[in-house]
Amino acid sequence: MDIEFPVWFILSTYLIGLTFIYLGYRICAKQQLSLIGSGVKLKNAEKLNTVCKLTGIYSVVLETLVMAIPMFNLFFNLFIIMFIVGITIIASTIFWFALQKIYFVPFTSILTKVTKDVRKGECVK
């Protein structure tokens, strides 16, 4: 019970995959954590290299899975493909929660500092 994916879907998976390759390279090789988000602050600045490597590896694995969806269609039915996508979403959620818990400053502490600065009348940029 295979499903024929349209050409635009196959091309978009390759485009998204190439985008993840590019972002993984920029995060891993150039250590640009700003690509993850603007409010990202590390608990320990010495762990920047570890965080960048983990995020780069995650990006490459995700890119491989996204680009392999049309190829999975040749061997598996749609339900198995959706199962693989679901497992990937769950694994991504676990990865980011673990990464945040171990390496990043919680966002609520950043918001608390900003509100304290605003209450003092200091200009925050």
Image (tube, rainbow, N blue to C red):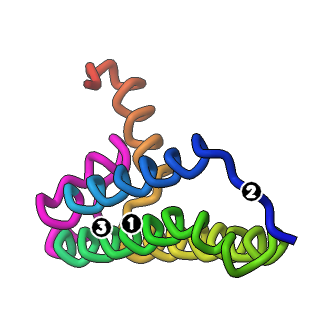
Residue under label 3: 43
Eye-nearest disc, 2 or 1: 2
Image location of residue 111, percent across then percent down:
46, 41
Mark found first going from the N terminus, 2 or 3: 2
Per the model, the C-alpha gap separating discs 3 and 1 is 22 Å
Image location of residue 117, percent across then percent down:
34, 31
Per the model, the C-alpha gap separating discs 2 and 1 is 27 Å
Q: Amino acid at mark 1?
A: Ser
Q: Is residue 13 left or right of residue 39?
A: right
Mark found first going from the N terminus, 2 or 1: 2
Residue under label 1: 59
Indicate the quadrant containing the C terminus: top left, top right, bottom left or bottom right. Answer: top left
- Could you tell me which secondary element the residue under label 3 belongs to? loop
Specify few, some or many for label 2: CA neighbours under 10 Å numbering under 14, 14-19, or 20 or more: few
Image location of residue 58, percent across then percent down:
40, 72
| Residue 70 highlighted magenta (yes or no) | no
Mark found first going from the N terminus, 3 or 1: 3
| Residue 41 highlighted magenta (yes or no) | yes
Determine the residue positioned at 31% across, 60% down: 21
Determine the residue positioned at 45% across, 54% down: 14
Q: Which mark is residue 4?
A: 2
Q: Is residue 38 above or below residue 106?
A: above
- Between residue 83 and residue 32, name the one nearer to us: 83
User: In the image, which residues are magenta?
Assistant: 27-46
- Could you tell me which secondary element the residue under label 1 belongs to? helix
- Between residue 24 and residue 109, name the one nearer to us: 24
